[in-house]
């Protein structure tokens, strides 16, 4: 089985001129080996390369995979800072407003839409994902603790998300040649363990690590200090000998990895077809939909339905649409097409006065919710049935428990079945927000609450 190895570089130092040269030499290493890597570029870095006349480097980069790494990277305010108080829609709009100029730079220079996006340092926020969809960027490629699904690629907010993989490693350039050797040995070991099952390894570094002693942004933006452009200071440089050793170590790392028989080096641009969503274009029978809804009684989670993965939101949408179609057309549909929906945007506000829901009330609710989902492209935060307000989790499991009877012609009311949002466990409630660029004591855990609601959209993205 192939082990897919993603090698990606965050190219971001727009202050230290020597890092331009490092980028050129890094690209040369891959070109010498005839291999492609993914370079996630900062907008200002690309404009800086143009201003400093490095058109040769930009030309060389064109034959590689290009991703996006924001417009100004760590210039305060960071993404979690400026999104912390935004609601879902205004947060999406704010991210687009602040970061679109860098995307335009990349599109102008490389004449294509970047293959992927990854956040600067610890700057994760869930609002970014729908923005990526609007931009036509299908992959989130980075490392970090915010989302993960059993250590494998997954879909989150309809973006192929490569966070939280079991095997993600920094190549170790900033630790020197010895460290790169140690990381290489560990990666070779991992490849050996994965050769029978297949799997993914995600490896990353930064262009500046070959030439600077510390990160350029720690020098200029440490602890939220917004040093103005006129006062930007290049990061302190390594001596030439140390830099040369790091290039050699990188060359050995790439050469050794590529020579391993089970390794396939892949770029982010290949990922959407390798891990494509097989639910797209599929239809589902009422029996399949009923089964997927009922299966969530033990906890809301992704479901295998007709051999393909559905997120809880997709199951919810199908369940609602099935009942809406029944009442609209006065008969059960033969099947329903796959559709994607975003998760709820607020925690459910519930009010329970009954212990059973009548089928007529449920029909009315599903007609309303079907139109609402159509209009907004997202699940409701709570569902009104008669005089009751239910969480989407309780609503869909209640429907799921009764659907098999209803499909057979029974019209009895449905006893309310409680469920829990088990899928939320894939987005933590708390992470350390310790990136050196954040102001001291910064905490963006409320963004994780928003992100946990979007766990409704999570599902595995296995190799297709
Ligand atoms: Zn970065």
Image (cartoon, grey):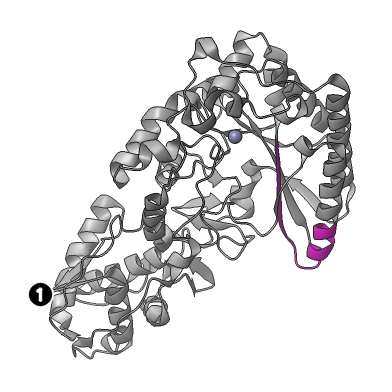
- Locate residue 421 relative to residue 163 in the image: left or right: left
Q: Position of residue 328 (x, y in %)?
A: 18, 69
Image quadrant, ligand 1: top right
Residue occupying image coordinates x 41% and y 71%: 284
Residue stretch in magenta? 189-205
Vertical arrangement, residue 464 with respect to residue 329, above or below: above
Which is more toward the observer, 426 or 75? 75
Tell me, yes or no, if residue 340 can be seen here.
no
Image coordinates of residue 4 in percent, x first then y, are 73, 53
Q: Residue 185: x percent and y percent?
A: 87, 52
Give left or right: position of 102 versus 6.
left
- Please name the residue shown 48% across and 37% down the image: 438
Locate residue 241: give its quadrant. top right
What residue is disc 1 on? Answer: 387
Secondary structure category for the residue under label 1: loop
Identify which residue, 87 or 331, lies in the foreground.
87
Which residue lies at the image location 39% right of the left edge and 57% below the top edge?
Answer: 454
Q: Residue 198: within the magenta?
A: yes
The answer to whether residue 345 is visible is: yes
Q: Does 61 sit above or below residue 439?
A: above
Check the picture and name the quadrant holding the C terminus.
bottom right
**How many numbered marks have been drawn onto this rendered protein structure?**
1
- Give percent across and percent down for residue 295: 42, 81
Q: Residues within 10 Å of mark 1 (few under 14, many from 20)?
A: few
Can you tell which quarter of the image residue 313 is in?
bottom left
Quadrant showing the N terminus: bottom right
Residue furthest toward the front? 440
Q: Residue furthest left?
A: 387
Q: Work out whether 133 lies above or below 46.
A: below
Note whether 227 is above or below 10 in the view shown: above
């Amino acid at each position: 089985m192939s082990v897919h190895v993603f090698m990606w570089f965050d190219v971001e130092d727009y202050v230290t001129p020597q890092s331009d040269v490092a980028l050129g030499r890094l690209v040369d290493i891959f070109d010498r080996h005839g291999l492609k890597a993914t370079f996630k570029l900062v907008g200002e870095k690309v404009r800086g390369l143009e201003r400093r006349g490095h058109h040769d480097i930009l030309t060389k980069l064109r034959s590689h995979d290009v991703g996006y790494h924001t417009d100004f990277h760590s210039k305060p305010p960071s993404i979690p800072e400026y999104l912390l108080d935004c609601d879902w829609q205004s947060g999406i709009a704010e991210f687009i407003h602040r970061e679109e100029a860098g995307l335009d730079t990349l599109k102008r220079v490389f004449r294509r839409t970047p293959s992927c996006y990854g956040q600067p340092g610890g700057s994760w926020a869930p609002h970014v994902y729908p923005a990526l969809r609007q931009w036509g960027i299908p992959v989130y490629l980075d490392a970090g603790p915010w989302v993960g699904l059993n250590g494998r690629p997954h879909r989150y907010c309809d973006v192929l998300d490569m966070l939280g993989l079991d095997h993600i490693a920094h190549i170790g350039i900033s630790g020197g040649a010895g460290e790169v050797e140690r990381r290489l040995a560990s990666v070779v070991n991992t490849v050996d363990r994965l050769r029978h099952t297949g799997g993914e390894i995600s490896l990353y570094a930064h262009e500046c690590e070959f030439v600077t002693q510390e990160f350029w942004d720690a020098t200029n933006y440490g602890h939220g200090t917004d040093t103005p452009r006129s006062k930007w200071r290049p990061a302190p440089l390594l001596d030439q000998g140390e830099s040369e050793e790091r290039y050699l170590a990188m060359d050995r790392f790439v050469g050794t990895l590529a020579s391993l028989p089970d390794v396939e080096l892949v770029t982010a641009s290949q990922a959407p077809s390798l891990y494509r969503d097989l639910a797209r274009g599929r239809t589902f029978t009422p029996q399949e939909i009923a089964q997927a809804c009922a299966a969530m009684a033990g906890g809301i989670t992704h479901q295998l339905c007709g051999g393909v993965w559905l997120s809880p939101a997709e199951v919810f949408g199908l369940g609602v649409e099935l009942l809406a179609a029944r009442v609209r057309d006065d008969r059960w549909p033969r099947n329903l097409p796959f559709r994607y929906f975003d998760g709820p945007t607020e925690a459910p506000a519930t009010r329970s006065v009954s212990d059973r829901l009548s089928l007529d009330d449920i029909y009315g609710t599903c007609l309303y919710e079907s139109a609402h989902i159509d209009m907004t492209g997202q699940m409701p935060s709570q569902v009104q049935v008669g005089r009751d307000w239910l969480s989407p989790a309780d609503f869909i499991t209640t429907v799921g428990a009764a659907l098999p009877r209803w499909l057979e012609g029974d019209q009895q009311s449905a006893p309310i079945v409680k469920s829990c949002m088990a899928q939320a466990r894939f987005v933590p409630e708390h992470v350390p927000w310790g990136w050196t660029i954040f102001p001291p004591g910064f905490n963006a855990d409320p963004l994780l609450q928003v992100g946990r609601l979007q766990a409704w959209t999570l599902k595995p993205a296995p190799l297709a």
